[in-house]
Image (cartoon, grey):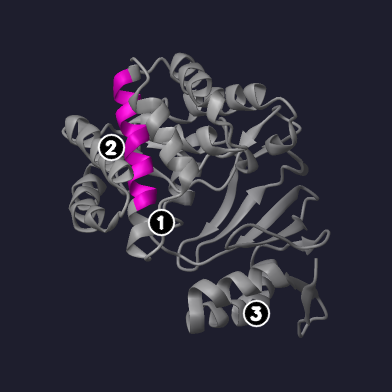
Amino acid sequence: MRRFTHVTNLGRVIDIPDALIARHELYGGEAGRAFVAGLPERAERFLDHWELRLDGPSMHGRCALVLPVLRADGTRAVLKLQDVDEETVGEPVALRAWDGDGAARLLACDGATGTLLLERLDAGRLLNDLADTRAATLVVARLLARLTAAPAPPALRRLGDLVPQLLDRASAVLPRVPDPAERRLLADCAAAVREVADEPGDRLLHWDLHFENVLGADRAPWLAIDPKPLAGDPGFDLFPALWNRFDADEVRWRFDAMTDTLSLDRARARAWTLARVLQNSVWQLEETRTPVPDHLTIARRLRDHPA
């Protein structure tokens, strides 16, 4: 992996992986380039503010630069530098609510910049590397059972507010789907969402708990990272584990295993999972792309799956 290396005024070496730079330039344009350009100064600022020492090569997720650090007392941590948007603004709220129960622990936060100091997990031990996808699915299910156990804090975005917008946007773009069978399938997804829209739920959802967002740790076998939290029905959280390392023949097994582990009403969970398919497909269509075939397969398998 190539990296852009910046030496700060205090002699610290801040490596920014080229993949992270390319992603911000591709999707963020001028704002993305400005974010990347400001990363060395921001890193320097918070290394000083929180009395941190760099402790290894930089890492990155889809949007954030992550620096392994040591705190003044020698505790291992990571400094996460990211933009503030509608998805990331709730991350510290959720992490405080969970307080390490099923997720990485929040150690400090700067709300203005979205910069987080987090418990360091084992970045070399990803759930995605587990050979047995059924075992990995059950790990996600057990984590979700813990993460969604309590009501969401009031500051978070709410599924109940997103659903009417989703249905309106779906009505606008579904006529663009050229294949009649796919158009009917997405219309069925929308119909399923309408059936549960009046009861969107109030649990604290992770929203993005896929296999790569689960890492090993010293204090627990597995912990979640990178929530994009909202308040809603836990059934809305199942989709990522259905799509991870996708296998059409495993969709129903994974869905049944997760709904059993979380003690969910299967019909409602199916409707909220179809809502995720609809949401993803609307995003694709709005960008003049076609829905993801794997997502449509998930919808077919669940639509035809008896509750």
Comparing labels 1 and 3, the label whose residue is closer to the camera: 1
Residue drawn at 60 percent across, 80 percent down? 38
Comparing labels 2 and 1, the label whose residue is closer to the camera: 1
For residue 171, side relative to residue 240 (left or right) = left
The main secondary structure of the magenta stretch is: helix
How packed mark 1 is, by other alpha carbons closer than 10 Å (few <14, some 14-19, many 20 or more), is some
Relative depth, front residue between 36 and 177: 177
Q: Is residue 33 visible to the viewer in this orientation of the structure? A: yes
Tell whether position 211 is magenta: no
x and y percent of residue 188 in the render? 25, 35
x and y percent of residue 300 in the render? 38, 31
For residue 193, side relative to residue 238 (left or right) = left
Q: Which of marks 2 and 3 is nearer the N terminus?
A: 3
- Residue named by callout 3: 41
The amino acid type, in three-letter code, at marker 2 is Cys
x and y percent of residue 90 in the render? 42, 51
x and y percent of residue 140 in the render? 57, 29
- Residue named by callout 1: 290
Image mark for residue 55: none
Quote the CA–CA distance across marks 2 and 1.
16 Å
- Determine whether 100 is above or below 162 in the image: above
Q: Which of marks 2 and 1 is nearer the N terminus?
A: 2
| Badge 2 vs badge 3, beta-carbon distance below 8 Å | no
Comparing labels 2 and 3, the label whose residue is closer to the camera: 2
For residue 271, side relative to residue 133 (left or right) = left
Image mark for residue 189: 2
Q: Is residue 156 visible to the viewer in this orientation of the structure? A: no
Residue drawn at 59 percent across, 59 percent down? 62
- Determine whether 60 is above or below 254 in the image: below
For residue 286, side relative to residue 169 (left or right) = right
Q: What stretch is highlighted in magenta?
A: 267-281
